[in-house]
Amino acid sequence: MSPFPPHIRLVIFDADNTLRRVTVPGRVCPWGPEEWEPLPGIRAALCGLRWGAGGLLLGMASNQDQVFYGHLTADMARRLLLDAAEAATGHRPPDGAVRFCIHAMDAGCGCRKPEPGLLHEAMEFQGMDPGATLFVGDADVDREAARRAGVAFLHVDDLLAGRQGAG
C-alpha cells in the first residue's frame, strides 16, 4: 500500500536527511560514495512500492552547493544522488529526473530551494503537472519550494511514521 495520496504520480525527493544521511561529522552532504548511508527506515517505507513504468515516477531536487565550493564534481553529485534514490527505493531513476543546484548559497538563482526551479524541471522532465506531484523533504526550504511550485509537500518524518499529511 502506497504511503502517498492516490492522485500522486510523481514523487520528488530531497536528498540529505530525507533519503540519505551523511556519515562524516560536520558535512552537509557527502563528497564521495563512502560518506553516506540511507536514512534509517527509508527503505522499509519505499522499497515495496512500484517505481518507474507502470508505477510511481521518481525525481530528486537537491541543493548541492558543495560542487560550487569545489568539494566534489557535478558528475559525482549526480552519481551520489542516483545512488541514494536507488538505495531508498530499489529503483534507479533516469539521469534527467535528478535535478540539483550547484550554485553558491547566496547566488540568488531560480533553482536553489526554496526557489521552485528544480521542482519545475523535474516535473517537466517527467511530463507531470503540479497536481499530480508530491515533494518529500525535511526542511523549511523544501516546504517553501513545494509551495512556490504549487505541489503537495510531505515531511520525511511523516512518511516514516506512515502518515499522509501532505499539504
Image: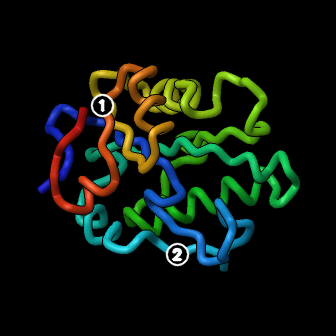
Marks 2 & 1, CB-CB < 8 Å contact: no
**3D distance between C-alphas at marks 2 and 1:** 27 Å
Query: 77 or 9: which is nearer to us?
Result: 77
Q: Residue at x 14, y 38 (%)?
A: 6
* Side (left or right) of 7 relative to 98: left
Q: Which labelled disc corresponds to residue 152?
A: 1
Q: Which mark is residue 140?
A: none
The residue tagged 2 is: 37
Q: Nearer the viewer, residue 26 or 35?
A: 26
Q: How many marks?
A: 2
Label 2 crowd bin: few (<14), some (14–19), many (20+), radius 10 Å = some
- In the picture provided, is 74 more to the left or to the right than 54? right
Q: Residue at x 41, y 35 (%)?
A: 143
Residue 132 found in image quarter? top left
User: Picture coordinates of residue 145 (x, y %)?
Assistant: 48, 29
State the image coordinates of residue 139 (x, y, percent, origin top left).
46, 46
The secondary element bearing badge 1 is classed as: strand
Q: Residue furthest right?
A: 70
Q: Residue at x 43, y 69 (%)?
A: 39
In the rendered image, residue 34, in percent from the top left (x then y), is placed at 66, 79
> Which amino acid, mark 1?
Ala
- For the N terminus, which image quadrant? bottom left
Q: Quadrant of the C terminus?
A: top left
Task: Identify whether 87 is placed above or below 91.
Answer: below
* Amino acid on which the number 2 mark rests in the picture: Glu
Q: Residues within 10 Å of mark 1 (few under 14, many from 20)?
A: many
For residue 38, above or below residue 156? below
Q: Is residue 140 above or below residue 125?
A: below
Is residue 2 rendered to the left or right of residue 89?
left
